[in-house]
Image: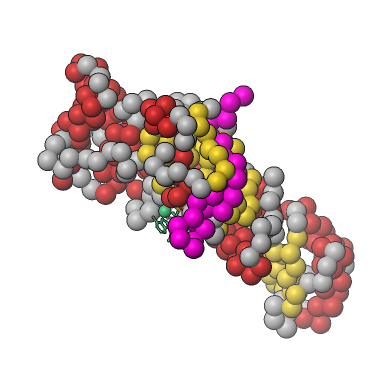
């Protein structure tokens, strides 16, 4: 199977900054692939190399089997990059903009018009299509921008932080659009700073920091990698805290933490360990004032991963 996107040992430096420092990616056709990382991690640089706008200093990259340096023209014909290639004309209507992009790609007039209507419909802009773009809200603009990037029926769509700055309602609207692109069989490579966004959209994620991939896997794999759950127990009688500690130690296989004089917590690997704790407490006749299983927030997962590299500056923790 030809991968939709493949990079090997990709490196790009700007002066003394190693913006991309040996990135390997393997994206299967039809996937939504998330590149997740904080500001300055190298996300845009990776996308610019893949979109043939920058040459790598070392390593290689291909899109739909074509090398981004040697076969740059062919790559360019098969991709779209939102916000870069599509620049909307404020004085034209949404529909006129889309027709214009179609004409620029040499589509006959009737075909460009039909394609424009089809995309307006798909991106919930049928009514807005008759309005000038200058009257559009931020969310409508992003959607039109996305629609414009699909005029040429690209096989691979690059979305560089498509929802940064959008409010949550608009964000979910755009997520639906991104899913519909993948549902048609196109491959989407999406960068984001938001774990939540990568989780909502991506089939697979590479977490990058300081130009390196520090973890990769499906969202559940990443969560399992660092996302340990925490059991919290507050016995009704604080005199039984030592017994509770023994139970938690027995189930989790390591020392529980004392959150306060009456509350113990312990990290566990599996939901079933929570059930085990409940059963043991019950058997011992220990009643709880509080008994819960706390999930890590997605941001905690991300911060744990990024924090790790900040501490030791090395690559570690690959899930797959
Ligand atoms: N054209 C450039 N000239 C100099 N430094 C750059 C250039 N583009 C990016 N960088 C630097 O490379 C690093 C990665 O940038 P970038 O790829 O834009 O990260 P991200 O998109 O993840 O925020 C940053 O330190 C940034 O300042
Ligand atoms: Mg960027």
> Per the image, is 6 magenta?
yes
Left or right of residue 166, residue 312 in this image: right
Q: Residue placed at 17% from the left, 40% from the top?
A: 89
Q: Is residue 163 above or below residue 65?
A: below
Ligand 1 sits in quadrant: bottom left
Residue sitting nearer the eye, 76 or 81: 76
Res 179 seen here? no
Q: Is residue 237 above or below residue 204?
A: below
Residue sitting nearer the eye, 21 or 246: 21
Number of numbered discs: 0
Furthest residue to the left? Answer: 91
> Per the image, is 107 magenta?
no
Q: Residue placed at 77% from the left, 81% from the top?
A: 238
Residue sitting nearer the eye, 36 or 184: 36
Left or right of residue 72, residue 144 in this image: left
Give the magenta-colored segment's residue range: 1-24
Q: Residue placed at 59% from the left, 37% from the top?
A: 26
Q: Position of residue 85 (x, y in %)?
A: 30, 38
What secondary structure predominates along the stretch shown in magenta? strand
Residue sitting nearer the eye, 279 or 254: 254
Where is residue 74, by image quadrant?
top left
């Amino acid at each position: 199977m030809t991968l939709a996107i493949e990079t090997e040992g990709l490196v790009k430096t700007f002066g003394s900054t190693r913006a991309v420092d040996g990135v390997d990616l393997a994206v299967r056709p039809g996937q939504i692939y998330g590149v997740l990382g904080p500001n300055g991690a190298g996300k845009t640089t990776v996308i610019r190399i893949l979109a043939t706008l920058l040459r790598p200093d070392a390593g290689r990259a291909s899109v739909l089997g074509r090398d981004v340096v040697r076969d740059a023209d062919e790559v360019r014909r098969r991709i779209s990059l939102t916000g870069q290639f599509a620049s909307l004309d404020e004085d034209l209507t949404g529909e006129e903009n889309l027709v214009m992009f179609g004409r620029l790609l040499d589509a006959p007039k009737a075909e460009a018009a039909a394609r424009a209507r089809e995309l307006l419909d798909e991106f919930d802009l049928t009514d807005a299509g008759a309005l000038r773009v200058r009257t559009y809200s931020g969310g409508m603009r992003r959607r039109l921008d996305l629609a414009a990037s699909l005029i040429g029926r690209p096989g691979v769509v690059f979305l560089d932080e498509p929802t940064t700055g959008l409010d949550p309602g608009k964000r979910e609207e755009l997520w639906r659009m991104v899913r519909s692109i993948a549902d048609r069989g196109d491959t989407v490579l999406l960068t984001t700073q938001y774990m939540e966004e990568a989780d909502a959209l991506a089939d697979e994620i590479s977490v990058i920091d300081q130009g390196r991939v520090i973890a990769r896997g499906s969202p559940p794999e990443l969560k399992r990698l660092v996302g340990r759950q925490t059991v919290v127990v507050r016995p009704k009688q604080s005199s039984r805290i030592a017994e509770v500690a023994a139970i938690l130690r027995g189930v989790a296989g390591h020392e529980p933490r004392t959150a306060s004089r009456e509350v113990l917590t312990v990290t566990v690997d599996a939901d079933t360990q929570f059930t085990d704790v409940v059963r043991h407490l019950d058997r011992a006749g220990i009643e709880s004032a509080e008994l819960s299983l706390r999930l890590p927030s997605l941001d905690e997962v991300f911060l744990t991963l990024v924090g790790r590299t900040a501490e030791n500056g090395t690559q570690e923790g690959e899930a797959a």
